[in-house]
Image (tube, rainbow, N blue to C red):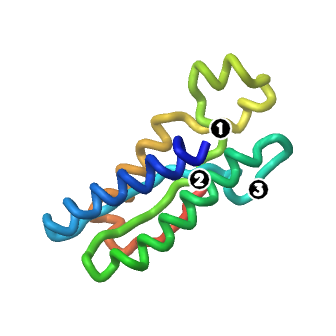
């Protein structure tokens, strides 16, 4: 779980940040999960790995700010996908967020409209 969630984020940020700095600045948006804040029975590995993504994003936001790189992180609840619908009850899916809604927030965070936002952890 750490390799999947944290290592992939670490390497993506490392490579992406170098390119963004070279181009004069920009934004990185990482995806964590609401469970990074709340945890839950049976979710230790997932919650800890997503909490690590949250903390990594906040540290990178501070470290990369002088280089005009904004780093923010999203903490979605369950995302409404076919796989999640198949695994979860209708009640669990009642508050699921659509992939399109997540994409809109990511788009906004990458736009000039959010140019002053860095280090934010947004729940969606």
Q: Considering the numbered disc 3 on the image, is that residue within a helix, a strand or a loop? A: helix
Spot occupied by residue 100 in the image (x, y as percentages of width and height):
46, 36
Q: Circle 3 sits on which residue?
A: 38
- Is residue 124 among the parts visible in the rendering? no
Closer to viewer: mark 3 or mark 1: 3
**In which quarter of the view is residue 16 placed?**
bottom left
Disc nearer the start of the sequence (2/3): 3
Residue under the point 35% across and 69% down:
70
Give whichever of 115, 11 is nearer the camera: 11
Give the side of residue 37 with respect to residue 24, left or right: right
Residue under the point 54% across and 34% down:
98
Identity of the residue furthest to the bottom in this view: 66
Instruction: Tell whether label 1 touches label 2 (CB within 8 Å).
Output: no
Q: What's the mark number on residue 75?
A: 2
Instruction: Tell whether label 1 touches label 3 (CB within 8 Å).
Output: no
Give whichever of 72, 117 is nearer the camera: 72
At label 2, counting other C-alpha atoms closer than 10 Å, the crowd grade (few under 14, some 14-19, many 20 or more) is many
Separation (CA) of disc 3 from disc 1: 13 Å
Q: Is residue 32 above or below residue 20?
A: above
Identity of the residue furthest to the left in this view: 23
């Amino acid at each position: 779980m750490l390799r999947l969630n944290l290592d992939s984020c670490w390497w993506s940020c490392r490579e992406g940040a170098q390119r963004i700095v070279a181009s004069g600045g920009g934004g990185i948006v990482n995806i964590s999960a609401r469970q990074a804040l709340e945890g839950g029975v049976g979710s230790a590995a997932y919650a800890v790995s997503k909490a690590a993504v949250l903390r990594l994003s906040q540290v990178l936001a501070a470290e990369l700010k002088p280089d005009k790189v904004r780093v923010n992180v999203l903490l979605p609840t369950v995302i409404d996908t076919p796989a999640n619908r198949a695994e979860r009850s209708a009640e669990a899916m009642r508050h699921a967020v659509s992939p399109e809604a997540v994409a809109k927030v990511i788009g906004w965070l990458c736009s000039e409209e959010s140019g002053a936002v860095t280090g934010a952890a947004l729940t969606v």
